[in-house]
Amino acid sequence: MEAAAGQQQRFAELDALAARLLAAALGGRPVVTVTRGEGPQAADSVEVTALDPMETVWCAGRFGVREQQQRGAWYLPQKLSVKAGTLNLPHLLRARPAHALTVAADDSVRLQVADGADTLLVWALLVPLFDALLEPVRVRAAGPAGSHEEQRQLWAGIEERYRVLGVDDGALDVFRFGGGWHQLDRSGQQQVRLALLDTLAAADLAQLVARHRMLRLQELMAGFAKKAKTGTALARRVVTRALQPVVSGYFAGDWLAVLDYLQAPPHPDEEIITALPEPRLFVGMSSQATDMAAEAGIAEDEIHAMLAAFHGGSALSPVEERAAALHSWWDAFDQAHAVQSPGMPSLWGLVDHELMSVSRTDDGFTPQLYRQVLPTGVLEQVSRLWETVTLQRHPGSIVSNPRPHQSMADALGPAADFWHGLGLTAWFVCEGPYSRAPLSGVSNYYGRPLAALAAAGCPVETALFDELRTAEQRLGPEEMIPDGESSTVETPHGPVTFTSSRSRGMRREGFERVRDIITRYRRAWAKQYLDAYLQHRWRIELEDVARQHHRYVAAKGRPPTLIQFARFATEAANHWTGGDLGALYTAIGEPTPSQQQQRPTRLLAGDGYDFAWRVYQELGGKPVDHDTWMNTPEETRRQWQLGRLATESLRYLQLQEVLGQPPTAKQFGAHRLVWPWPGEEAEGWPVLQQVLATLAHTNPPSDTGPSPAADAVPPAKRQDGGQQVLAKGGNAPMATEAATIRITASGMPVDVSAVLLTSRGRVRGDDDLVFYNHPSQDGVRVNGNTVTADLSLIPESVSSVAVVVSVDPEARPGAVFGQDAMWEAEVTQPSGTRLSFTPPAFTRRETVAVAVELYRHTGAWKARAVGQGYDTGLAGLAIDYGIDVET
């Protein structure tokens, strides 16, 4: 077909590269090197080491992220999870057969797409190829799954793929179902795997690679045909998550090349964006008022009045206000460290960086120390400017911020991390009781904030560390810090006093000298860099939001909704606009799609620490002292659990402000917490709700049960013919067998999908979204408007399956449920279960709805009629379920 269309040379170089890398791997050579990122948030990296220098240059032009984006590939995800170990599996099977599968599995990596061409080469081209060829090894390593019939169907699919690829299927004789795999010992299984590699290596790899490519391109053609109902479809409609690697791998991200291959004209509205606009920020205009007034020929006061109207009352923008407040805070922070002297408490607690804990009594730590040390004016400024935030999953409202000083410190960033941390290290080295790092090691210990300061163009002078090393050598000798106890008892011979003492750490004389060295360097750094550093802090966050916004528009052809914008803008809004997404839109020069509720009724009055402490006491909490920590670990653990519930209560109040009513256990995520009561969550959840209602002066919820109200709704009604009609929220028992859910729509076509969820109500990974481009997963299959779930095959890690109905945007753009379409659901099983559900009318322009949920309950399965709609589209549902849908 390609030869007939004159396309035979289009993929020649690409096929040759893939065939050569495949040959190297099958011959026993490692293909990639994986480097793990340092830290929980750090990305890994992957390098295709089997490339020669010319191939490296060629791949950079074809698979480079910037190069693909210049061809219009703005769909590229920013983060990827890739099974890179699959590429080295042939090498490991030959070199380390006993441990190959374990080592390869450990090389699943989290990658940043911007890291380079190797990342896209691995994701788009190599991993799909190696996965297809090594599937027999992977399936046998995972063990049997499903019924005998399903296993036969699985192996029939693998055999058919091998036949299409031109591989001798005799290599599968032992692998396939009933082939005798489980009769082999470990050595025998290793030999069979090696024989498979030899068979693959003996195949015509150029033909094999070309045939695999055709299978992938057929998937692209099917997706194109599905969306091209009335002519060529727009790229953003066709290039789904499943097809993104196909377009990037075989067409270098070039949609016009795809159309040329398919011999289809572009859609009239198609726009290929080759570069994003540079971010333009509308911040800092007040400092330009004099020049603006002179240029316009009007009084400067009028410029300030116009700016005040623009910013809602102040000539300073919200960002400038917060930057000025950070400068004032820094001056007070600097003074507090400069006057610190022996005999005073440590300054641990001056910066609100610590995880909130109400159950601990750390030596030297004073919660909310800033309230005792900082001037009243600074405290009031921080509380006012950072008193509100937006919750990413609920961006429609601005809510109370229980920790404004923490938000302020986060906005300030690594400057506070380093200079405050250094001051504390000096204190604990000199005044004890102990320090986590010596003065001679602080440049390494604080390496991360130091690197961030250098990257911001505000480096710390290295001479500081030389002086600290010298000062440490001149400190006094170590002196024990005694911790004594005495008790007196009466005896026939009079009172007798028993005294015991122990060391609680060491101190060394000389703190003032070290303090003055640090103060001198800190003040010199602030004089040279502080203004520029503060501007860098807000500019880098706002410019990143602007770029993300431009990238979304380029990929989707429309601006993001508020909830989609919140996914990448919430942190910046909480740092620089008090959670006001509208003000952030203004700062990046974009129109706001909808207004947030400025703030519902505030439930959290005062500092969150005070409220959490009262909750802790009401729950029966008592701070853990040293004796309790040493002698009664069970009570220590219980107190920590009560403290965790107390701090989580702040989030409960934020949710109540957003929702306008107390959150349910599911909305709160009660299942994620440990409940230190004999009855666990069932006993503790009502207690926590009652305590919070009392302390927040609100009415307790009418239903304080531990679970959603699904099991408290009226029973289903039975109609003639044995069918049960479920009301919204109703449930009915299910047999542990196959279940079929059919969606019947009227008014317009709909798309049907299914989501596999854990007990936390979240997906395990992106594969748990089952839809037309990924039609089956762990016993759940989607076919058109029908979902089939074999409840006997669903893994224990899956607690529920949600069936989702969504408006087909291609059929009628702008259509919503209620006005343009309605649906009903029918659930049937071979044993006789027949359920039906017609949801109440949708009135909020919902385009997506969860129709039915199948869920585990006390060892069995039940079905629930849900009918929950989303006016935020699939993005809102994805956020609720933890699906990583690219913004």
Image: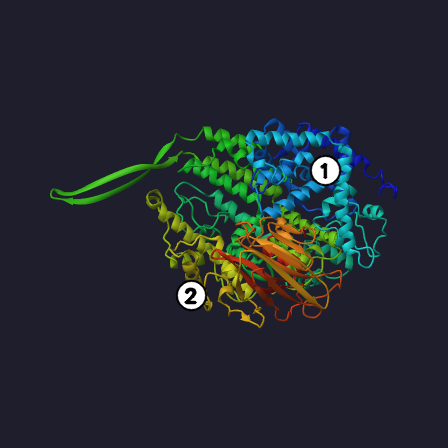
Which residue is at a point 44% across and 52% down the rendered structure image?
A: 674
Residue 427 drawn at (x, y percent): 44, 39
Residue 99 drawn at (x, y percent): 56, 31
Q: Is residue 753 above or below residue 412?
A: below
Mark 2 residue type: Thr
Q: Helix, strand, or loop for circle 2?
A: helix
Mark 1 residue type: Ala
**Quick check: 443 left or right of 532?**
left
Tags 1 and 2 in contact by the CB under 8 Å rule?
Answer: no
The label shown at residue 694 is 2
Which residue is at a point 61% across and 51% down the rendered structure image?
A: 768
Residue 371 drawn at (x, y percent): 46, 53
Q: In the depicted view, which residue is nearer to us: 584 or 327?
A: 584
Mark closest to the chain's N terminus, 1 or 2: 1
Q: Which residue appears farthest toward the bottom when viewing the image?
A: 720
Q: Helix, strand, or loop for circle 1?
A: helix
Residue 313 drawn at (x, y percent): 64, 64
Quadrant position of residue 704? bottom left
Q: In the depicted view, which residue is nearer to us: 372 or 187?
A: 187
**Quick check: 525 left or right of 217?**
left
Q: Which residue is mark 1?
A: 117
Which residue is at a point 61% across and 29% down the rendered structure image?
A: 191
